[in-house]
């Protein structure tokens, strides 16, 4: 039997309004009264009817998370954290895959169909600020730096600084011919351009040549693309002593290609990635990487959406920067007898 607010009120000897105030966390309830209501809730195993609550507020209780590719492990891991954070607000998360296509991103940014969702967390590749300005106002939080000056709230990490720090780590190891794998020249390659800029910053600061022959493009950031890029570098006669991969799945492909070529990691070639996906921790050797705080990114995005859905019309647009760390493992020479070394490079949430 599903109990109602009225049943809890009768058990506690209070009004239905008082029970509602306790359930909704209102502070103006006397401590002894709150205790009686909470005891009645526990005894009756009362659970709020979230669907009815959302309908009363004109909401569906559903938000969407739209990402380019679900088979990129970073996005799958991020989705898990978004679902957990949304559950704390009583929300269900609809997950969509856009393929990075502008038209599909426009569809989800306009509320999908029939205003199915209350709000959206979107990682865009093709969408522009002009596209957002022309849509119907579905509350939206953007992930990443694709749209830097748009009208929507945004959560990012500092891709340039993170790429610079992991490249500088390779330089401090004594590596001098450091390849970059994952460059992209399309409009959708915002993260690639930023990570390439950080890589080049580190080389310049160390007085090293920015050798274009050491920069390998990848049309997508999958394992096969990383392997193909590394094979291309080796076939061309380029012999790097380190490789910075723009994500971990590229790095897994690079590890495979180096193994096929009879090169040892990290003795012959050190390898570092970006994203700290679970597969990288179990690779042989375990992968050094930049670790964006995915849980914090998810929590910030969900909270920004909750703030936007609160209905405050004066709320300013927020652009937040989440922290990241370097996780140094066997692929750049950390001892296999310890888990890994963690270096906090950007230690807290900040406003951009």
Image (cartoon, rainbow, N blue to C red):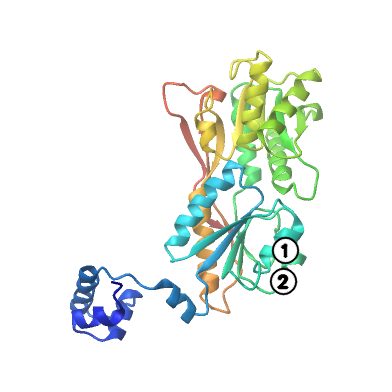
Where, quadrant-wise, is the N terminus in this rendering?
Answer: bottom left
Q: Which label number is shown at residue 135?
A: 2
Quadrant where the C terminus sits is bottom right
Residue 333 versus residue 127 in the image, above or below: above
- The residue where tag 1 is placed is 106
At x 47%, y 81%, the residue is 56
Other-residue count near label 2 (Cα within 10 Å), few / some / many at <14 / 14–19 / ≥20: few
Q: Is residue 349 visible?
A: no
Given residues 48 and 161, the one toward you in this image is 48
What numbered label is drawn on residue 320?
none
- In percent of width and height, residue 314 lies at 58, 78
Find residue 2 and report its horizontal and vertical position in percent: 31, 72
Q: Are marks 2 and 1 in contact (CB under 8 Å)?
A: yes
Horizontal and vertical percent for residue 302? Answer: 51, 62
What residue sits 58% from the left and 44% below the top?
74
Between the residue at mark 2 and the residue at mark 1, the CA separation in whole angstroms equals 8 Å
Side of 90 relative to 159 (left or right): left
Residue 183: horizontal and vertical position, in percent?
75, 38
Is residue 288 or residue 232 the one in the foreground?
232
Q: Say whether residue 96 is left or right of residue 4.
A: right
Q: From the viewer's perspective, is residue 266 above or below residue 185?
A: above
């Amino acid at each position: 039997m599903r109990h109602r607010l009225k049943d809890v009120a009768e058990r506690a000897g209070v009004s239905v309004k008082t029970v509602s105030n306790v359930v909704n966390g209102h502070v103006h309830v006397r401590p002894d009264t709150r205790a009686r209501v909470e005891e009645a809730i526990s005894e009756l195993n009362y659970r709020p009817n979230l669907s009815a609550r959302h309908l009363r507020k004109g909401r569906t209780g559903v938000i969407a998370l739209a990402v380019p590719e679900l088979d990129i492990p970073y996005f799958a891991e991020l989705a898990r954290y978004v679902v957990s954070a949304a559950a704390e607000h009583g929300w269900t998360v609809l997950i969509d895959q856009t393929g990075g296509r502008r038209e599909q991103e426009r569809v989800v940014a306009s509320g999908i169909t029939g205003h199915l969702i209350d709000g959206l967390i979107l990682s865009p590749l093709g969408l522009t600020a002009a596209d957002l300005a022309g849509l119907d106002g579905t509350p939206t939080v953007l992930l990443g730096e694709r749209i830097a000056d748009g009208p929507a709230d945004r959560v990012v990490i500092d891709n340039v600084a993170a790429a610079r720090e992991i490249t500088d780590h390779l330089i401090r190891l004594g590596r001098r011919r450091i390849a970059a794998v994952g460059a992209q020249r399309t409009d959708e390659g915002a993260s690639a351009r930023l990570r390439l800029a950080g890589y080049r910053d580190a080389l310049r600061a160390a007085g090293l040549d920015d050798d274009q022959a050491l920069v390998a493009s990848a049309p997508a950031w999958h394992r096969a693309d990383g392997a193909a890029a590394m094979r291309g570098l080796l076939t061309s006669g380029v012999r790097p002593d380190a490789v910075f991969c723009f994500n971990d799945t590229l790095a897994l492909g690079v590890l495979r290609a180096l193994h096929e070529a009879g090169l040892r990691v990290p003795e012959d070639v050190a390898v570092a990635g970006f994203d700290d996906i679970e597969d990288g921790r179990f690779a042989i050797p375990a992968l050094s990487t930049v670790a964006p705080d995915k849980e914090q990114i998810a929590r910030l995005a969900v909270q920004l959406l909750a703030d936007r859905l609160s209905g405050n019309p004066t709320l300013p647009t927020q652009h937040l920067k989440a922290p990241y760390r370097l996780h140094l493992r066997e692929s750049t020479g950390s001892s296999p007898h310890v888990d890994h070394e963690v270096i906090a490079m950007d230690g807290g949430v900040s406003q951009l």
